[in-house]
Image (cartoon, helix red, strand yellow):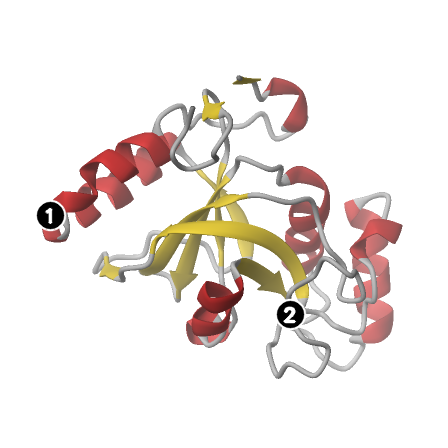
Amino acid sequence: VSLLTGSKVIQMAVAWKIAPGEGAEDWDVCQDLGCIGLGWMELKNYQRFKSEKLALRALKKEYARDPKGNRQGAARAIWYFCHEIEPADIVVASDGLSSVVGIGVVTSDYLPPRSSKNPIPKDSSMWGRHARLVNWVVKDRIDLHEVVFARDAVHRLSPERCEQIKQAYLKHYPKLRATLDEVFDGIYAADTANTSATKKLFA
């Protein structure tokens, strides 16, 4: 039994970089509520988008005057957050392009802002209130001193990138070895055409 998930051991999982707001401005709230959030709040429920193309179409309509809010990268982030990320996947919470503020394990499916299971208050000032529940097992910050993340709010991390992050943490926080070993054990390069079909978990 995994000390991270409580009931399952992660054999194969995908690691995702997700930014908890610009400059990690929502990180404290994400820690407190046990979740990670994504924005574009004019879009009420990501589940209605049956393709990345449809998400992009909606973004262009709702954010017509905001060129940063209606690009392909935003649509891809929405698609990943709602449809590709799965419970037991790993979240690396980023601050900018070269820092990590925390690492956790996803424990829920996508939760739209109005879901009764979404822990983020409706009157929250958070940029992102579309949510996934996360068990944050590492809450210490690490600065990698080089560009390691793409600008997209959500993107996959390679096993090599995960190993780089792990080693950076161990250099400063050696007591985290057991936790980091378990978190990153089994991370693999996801098939971008069919992420969910290639994941395997065992009890």
Q: Which residue is mark 2?
A: 120
- Left or right, 11 with respect to 63, comes to left
Crowding at mark 2 (Cα within 10 Å: few <14, some 14-19, many 20+): many
Tell me if 182 is positioned left or right of 152 in this view. Answer: left
Q: Is residue 176 left or right of residue 159?
A: left
Foreground of the two, 55 or 174: 174
Q: Label 1: how many residues lie within 10 Å, few (<14), some (14-19) or many (20+)?
A: few
Q: Which residue is mark 1?
A: 171
Q: Earlier in the sequence, mark 2 or mark 1?
A: 2
Q: Secondary structure at mark 2?
A: loop
- Measuring from the top left, give residue 127's x and y in whole percent: 61, 76
Vertical placement of residue 120 versus 148, above or below: below
Q: Quadrant of residue 158?
A: top left
Closer to the camera, 166 or 131? Answer: 131
Identify the element where label 1 is drawn.
helix
The residue sitting at 59% across, 52% down in the picture is: 133
Circle count: 2
Give the amino acid type for the residue marked by disc 1 in the picture. Answer: Lys
Query: Could you tell me which quadrant the N terminus lies in?
Result: top left
